């Protein structure tokens, strides 16, 4: 029951992120989503493995990455998302449709072993799609990074299906990779800002055929 | 031994990072790549045991790719000796450190026997190669780096999802160790396997530069410094190709070869079509060769998609293409040094003004487009042969058509650059001498491709045969 509530909250927070324009709010929401996410392994399989996962998510996604993202927006001094290509209202409607599609899709796919909750797969698909939508519909480089992170949260949810089957080491490696990816992207955002005095990726259009 | 090859470049990277001076860093780079090459050669003699509960291991396919990686890396680090001298005013600390970490990550890709570890390694290659693109710090290179990072990271995220789907499909085995998967492949849940194959092909296909996920490639490969482009085009794409081959191996073991083959044929032909559209009339010569990479990756995908002789041809083409692409991008490095421009129209009378670079460009052009007697010709011919033998006449038709179009497109630009007189440029700042350090690596790579066309060494033949057996071929 608690698990279902957590999953619904995670998807809901994703949709709220889609509708927000203030970057600080978006980062806070992402941190909150990751905080709820960190509790899910413990809700499914209480044990050492889950505890390690929880700590890793708490440190990396709830503490380090949001702090780093806050540092990045302060450093390049931007507050709001630029006017997106598709309006916020339309993005929200589209996000809702994607969540519906995620539920439909996962009802067609049968997991070949006993699931802990039949909400896990649709919730994970929804969050992945929401993250992807955020990534393609926003213009600021930093929101695109958050879109990528939301996508990763969705993938993490899916990985919970296999929590008791995969070795811890591989999960740690994946965490490390995502962490470095965000770090490198943050540095690139600074480079973009230096070159263009702005982190709007619409400027990045000189290379084309 | 395996662990040594992975740790050696990391150690080199740490040393390079701690050194305060640029010159000793170059020595570390050259030394590390040389020792790495010796280590790789020794693997052919003594096959090392699997390591770490089977997470690391070396089969004939991984060894083949690793050898190509190591040879090309050594050639490029030799070339970089002169290149970094010219760029001395820039600190090369981050550059050399990332370069060595990049080598380590690529080594790990060839040794990973666990699909999760393979994913980690391929993602690591993206992260360590991204800073290399931005060495010159121009606005264009920042843009190229951002696109590269973002598109490849999303692609790789798809591959992670695909890996998880694969684990669901193989739930009975409780692991995604490659050897375990191959042994139990017949028990997999087929719908999940198919879904996972789609996601993995799209994910690793993005990294490999297959259309329609290739959009980052022309930017990254044209804006990166030329020695880096040589590595990206020559070996990084092959590492992603290895990821696809591992997935194909599992499909073959699970009896889903036809499904995977159809996907690869579609992606391959699409890549050829895209490359032929953008190569014609391309005004930037580095971009032109970048699209030629898209083309060659398409050829690899088609070869695997056809099966039979195509498997052997495709693997052989991967080897040929790595050296040919490495060579041609190093030549573009020399061209850029002479003319300080990447525009085809700015380069005139190359044969008359700079005969050595001119001949190399002509050689490189013939090698990447697959003209005899270069090895690429024979591998492309084998793939055509496979298409006709397996009755894929439409594939054969479009394959030949697109290859011809691309040849004409590249030939037009290259001839424009080679011919004419240098009159207006003589005596200008362009009249720089072609130094020996930038010629030897190019000559070496060119000779390798040439030799592969004239004579097939038996160890390579065995390795190619062994690898195609792994992929379910005869």
Image: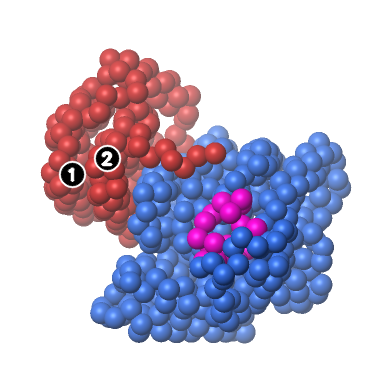
* Residue B249 occupies quadrant: bottom right
- Side of A193 where B401 appears, left or right: right
Q: Is residue A185 at least partly visible in the picture? A: yes
**Which residue position is annotated with label 2?**
A199
Where are the magenta residues, as a range?
Answer: B328-348
Q: Tell which chain the image draws in red.
A: A
Q: Residues within 10 Å of mark 1 (few under 14, many from 20)?
A: some
- In three-dimensional space, the C-alpha distance between marks 1 and 2, rounded to whole angstroms, equals 8 Å
Q: Residue at x 60, y 67 (%)?
A: B426
Q: Residues within 10 Å of mark 2 (few under 14, many from 20)?
A: many
Q: Residue at x 73, y 52 (%)?
A: B411
Residue A174: image location, x then y, percent: 34, 53
**Which residue position is annotated with label 1?**
A76
Please identify which colour was used for chain B in the image.
blue
- The secondary structure making up most of the magenta span is helix
Q: How many marks?
A: 2
Q: Is B432 included in the stretch rendered in magenta?
A: no
Q: Which mark is residue A38?
A: none
Residue B334: image location, x then y, percent: 56, 68
Position of the C terminus of chain B by quadrant: bottom right
């Amino acid at each position: 029951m608690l698990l279902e509530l957590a999953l619904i909250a995670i998807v809901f927070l994703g949709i709220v992120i889609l509708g927000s324009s203030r970057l600080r709010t978006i980062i806070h929401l992402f941190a909150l989503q990751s905080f709820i996410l960190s509790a899910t392994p413990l809700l499914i399989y209480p044990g050492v493995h889950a505890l390690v996962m929880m700590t890793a998510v708490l440190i990396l996604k709830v503490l380090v990455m949001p702090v780093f993202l806050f540092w990045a927006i302060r450093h390049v001094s931007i507050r709001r998302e630029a006017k997106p290509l598709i309006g916020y209202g339309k993005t929200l409607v589209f996000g809702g449709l994607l969540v519906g599609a995620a539920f439909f899709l996962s009802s067609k796919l049968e997991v070949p072993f006993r699931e802990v909750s039949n909400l896990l797969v649709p919730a994970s698909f929804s969050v992945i799609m929401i993250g992807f939508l955020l990534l393609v519909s926003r213009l600021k480089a930093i929101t695109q990074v958050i879109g990528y992170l939301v996508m990763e949260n969705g993938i993490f949810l899916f990985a919970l299906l296999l929590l008791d089957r995969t070795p811890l080491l591989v999960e740690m490696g994946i965490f490390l990779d995502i962490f470095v990816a965000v770090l490198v992207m943050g540095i690139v955002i600074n480079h973009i800002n230096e070159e263009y005095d702005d982190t709007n990726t619409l400027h990045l259009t000189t290379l084309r055929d | 031994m395996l662990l040594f090859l992975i740790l050696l470049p990391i150690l080199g990277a740490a040393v390079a990072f701690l050194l305060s001076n640029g010159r000793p860093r170059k020595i570390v780079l050259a030394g590390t790549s040389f020792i790495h090459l010796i280590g790789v050669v020794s693997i052919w003699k003594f096959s090392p045991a699997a390591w770490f509960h089977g997470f690391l291991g070396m089969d004939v396919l991984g060894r083949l790719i690793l050898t190509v990686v190591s040879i090309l890396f050594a050639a490029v680090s030799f070339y970089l000796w002169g290149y970094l001298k010219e760029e001395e005013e820039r600190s090369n600390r981050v550059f050399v450190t990332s370069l060595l970490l990049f080598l380590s990550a690529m080594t790990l890709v060839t040794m990973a026997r666990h699909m999760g570890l393979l994913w980690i390694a391929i993602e690591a290659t993206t992260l360590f190669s991204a800073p290399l693109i931005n060495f010159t710090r121009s606005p264009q290179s920042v843009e190229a780096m951002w696109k590269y990072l973002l598109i490849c990271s999303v692609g790789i995220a798809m591959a992670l999802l695909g890996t998880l789907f694969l684990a669901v499909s193989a739930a009975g085995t409780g692991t995604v160790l490659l050897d375990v998967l191959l042994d139990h492949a017949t028990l997999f849940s087929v719908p999940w396997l198919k879904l996972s194959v789609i996601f993995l092909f799209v994910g690793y296909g993005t990294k490999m530069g297959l259309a329609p996920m290739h959009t980052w490639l022309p930017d990254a490969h044209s804006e990166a410094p030329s020695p880096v482009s040589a590595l990206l085009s020559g070996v990084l794409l092959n590492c992603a190709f290895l990821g696809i081959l591992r997935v194909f191996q599992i499909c073959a073991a699970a009896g889903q070869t036809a499904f995977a083959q159809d996907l690869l044929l579609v992606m391959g032909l699409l890549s050829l079509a895209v490359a032929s559209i953008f190569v014609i009339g391309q005004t930037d010569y580095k971009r032109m060769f970048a699209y030629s990479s898209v083309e060659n990756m398409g050829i690899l995908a088609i070869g695997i998609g056809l099966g039979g002789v195509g498997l052997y041809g495709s693997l052989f083409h991967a080897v040929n293409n790595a050296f040919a692409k490495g060579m041609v991008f190093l030549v573009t490095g020399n061209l850029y040094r002479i003319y300080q421009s990447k525009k085809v129209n700015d380069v005139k009378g190359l044969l008359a003004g700079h005969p050595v670079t001119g001949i190399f460009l002509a050689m490189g052009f013939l090698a990447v487009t697959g003209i005899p007697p270069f090895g690429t010709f024979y591998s492309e011919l084998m793939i055509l042969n496979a298409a006709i033998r397996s009755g894929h006449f439409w594939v054969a038709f479009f394959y030949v058509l697109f290859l011809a179009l691309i040849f004409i497109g590249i030939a037009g630009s290259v001839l424009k650059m080679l011919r004419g007189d240098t009159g207006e440029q003589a005596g200008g700042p362009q009249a720089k001498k072609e130094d020996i350090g930038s010629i030897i690596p190019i000559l070496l790579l060119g000779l390798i491709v040439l030799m592969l066309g004239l004579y097939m060494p038996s160890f390579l033949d065995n390795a190619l045969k062994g690898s195609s057996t792994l992929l379910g071929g005869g």
